[in-house]
Image: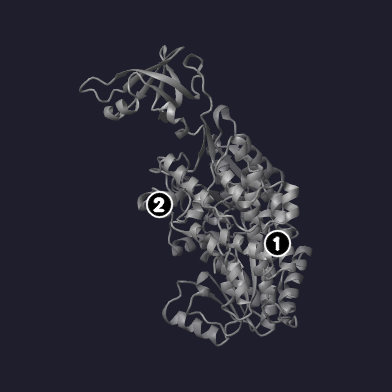
Amino acid sequence: MRPESLNPLFADVTSLAGVGPKVAALIGKVAGPRVIDVMLTLPSGVIDRSYRPQIMTADEGRLVTLTVSVEKHTPPPKGRQRLPYKVLCSDETGYVTLVFFHARPDYLMRVLPEGERRIVSGRVERYGAALQMTHPDYIVDPGKADEMPLIEPVYPLTEGLAAKTMRKAAQEAASRAPALPDWMRGDIMITEKWPGWQEAIQAAHAPESDLDLNPQSITRQRLAYDELLANQLALALIRRQRRKTAGKSREGDGHLRNEVAKALPFRLTGDQTRALDDILSDMGASHRMVRLLQGDVGSGKTVVALMAILAAIESGSQAVMMAPTEILARQHFASIEPLLKDTNITVEMFTGRDKGQQRAAKLSGLAKGYINILIGTHAVFSDDVVYDDLGLVIIDEQHRFGVHQRVALQDKGRRADVLVMTATPIPRTLALTTYGDMEVSQIKEKPPGRKPVDTRAVPLDKVDQVIGAVSRAVEKGEQVYWVCPLVETSDIIDLTSVEARYGELLQHLGDRVGLVHGKMKSEEKDAVVEAFYNGTIRVLVATTVIEVGVNAPAATIMVIEHAERFGLAQLHQLRGRVGRGDKASTCLLLYKAGEGGQLGETAKARLNILRETEDGFLIAEEDLRLRGAGDALGSAQSGFPVFRLADVGTHARLLDMARDDASLVVEEDPDLKTPRGEALRHLLYLFSRDDAVKLLRSG
């Protein structure tokens, strides 16, 4: 059960003063539906109203707070209500005009009575020879000066949500932070000089300057550490629970692996062999395997997965491989099935397209154990799919499957081992926060014979020359990918769409050009990709739908339009679609230059890194450093946890501390029964990691 002291924080935001259903919906967009969501949404800026000059010494364009006498109201002439309402004010040094559009005269006469003194705060501008302040942020009686905060936190907003409303809700949410038993280790508190949790939350919502917004400020560090510790402790508890759960030893005798290895046209690299040894060791152990296999684009993960599948079949079990798209599933099937032709192994494809008798036959074959390997989309885990003895689950390129989905997938097969594969090199810090419940193997070596891809940055205004080069390459029998950022032309964003580029290339190359994007039906996409794979189509114009999985070994040119719009890791993934055969390959990064024909510094740094290295792991770390975790994750990596208070790039040191701390807790107090353990239960609930607490209860 959630500790009672936390219940007020999990109340609906409508429990906050002045927050009705309409405002709650707006706050929900920027923070979330509960009080704790608002409390954990920290200020993103500060408004400083402490600059209090006299009128004549006020800096133009700056936020000022003036004490003035109200001299005269000048409403707009009758029938000309679009003109502003003006109020002339003064102090000992000069005059300033307060300007209001669409004003309510009765209200202004009430808050700015002629002959009275008032404090006004806003931005002053010069209009002709006169100073003016348009729509002051505050107008207060000098006797009630404390009603105007000199330092004002600024919160994220959405259309229709007033800054004052959000600020008031956040301040009240912060005031509800209860005094909780501290889960922090005493030595860390002393070394880091951190405040207690309640004090840190309240201080974070009361910044006194921009320095307090710095992620490395004492307050923000403390709160970031809390969030990272909750993440690492939850993963450590899940990992421990899994190790306690009995698995089934699946060693196999190697006969199928030896048979298939002879059919391979290559020998495994050192990294492939080491990764396979890790996997086979896990499969032979008495506990369940849950391992991540990280391999750069084209490093040969699929053959390692196949060897693991064969080990499962040798031990009498079935295996399933799930890919995120039908295109990728079919390519796995196409690459695996020929290698098994001289064995008695039955391998089948299974997708949402399987209907009627065809589907029934496959379901029956699975349930009776006739089908040894099933390859498909998420349909392989549909409720009606029952396995005879599922021993190995392989999930390929599926970031959206978080830690709890991984636990659920295993339930399809009692004690099934799980191997998650990704061709997206993941920075170490992100891997810790996402896959900390798993063992990790990496394949960094490229198979022998792979040639480096010649990567060049080309200004977009030379696109006609690029089209000419692509046409010549096609005439020589080469294949080309051409990637654009948009599906359709947009009036809002000035980027080339795939449809527009496809239309242009069609004029040059006719029916040798194909088009693929995410809005097409699966059957249409598959037909085009198949034609490209077979060589009927020579140029594939696409969005990043081809980033993962479209495999055409004969493709030698990758053109990426508006390369400056893509993240480093994503550009690297796209580049990895070429250079898979024995021919020299080229990647052309077409960029739109800024003013003066130059690229921005960050965009230039990204493109330079791509030109200098093909090491995906190094590229991923640089992407994180250049863009920060929020941007580096991108759509392709959408399954990574989104932290509210921590930034894994900025707070990498704190993440390492949290990992060590969590390991120590699980070692010394695995059931969280000590006083600190009880306090840590509060922490897990605070950051919605309570699934880990449920694991404790389930034993």
Q: Residue at x 76, y 74 (%)?
A: 281
Front position in the image: 640 or 504: 640
Residue type pointed to by label 1: Ala
Q: Position of residue 36 (x, y in %)?
A: 51, 55
Asked if residue 623 shows in the view, the reply is no
Asked if residue 19 shows in the view, the reply is yes
Residue 698 lies, with reference to residue 209, above or below; the image says below
User: Can you say which quadrant of the picture contains the C terminus?
Assistant: bottom right
Work out whether mark 2 precedes mark 1 in sequence or the reverse, and give the earlier one. 2
Residue 66 lies, with reference to residue 319, above or below; the image says above
Q: Which residue is mark 2?
A: 24
Element under label 1?
A: helix
Q: Position of residue 337 (x, y in %)?
A: 61, 74
Q: Residues within 10 Å of mark 2 (few under 14, many from 20)?
A: many
Element under label 2?
A: helix
Front position in the image: 130 or 431: 130
Front position in the image: 153 or 562: 153
- Determine whether, in the image, residue 607 is placed left or right of residue 47: right
Asked if labels 1 and 2 touch by Cβ distance under 8 angstroms, the answer is no
Residue type pointed to by label 2: Ala
- Determine whether, in the image, residue 405 is placed left or right of residue 523: right
Q: Which residue is mark 1?
A: 662
Q: Residues within 10 Å of mark 1 (few under 14, many from 20)?
A: many
**Farthest residue toward the front?**
143
Q: Residue at x 53, y 25 (%)?
A: 51
Residue 695 lies, with reference to residue 19, above or below; the image says below
Q: Position of residue 472 (x, y in %)?
A: 57, 45
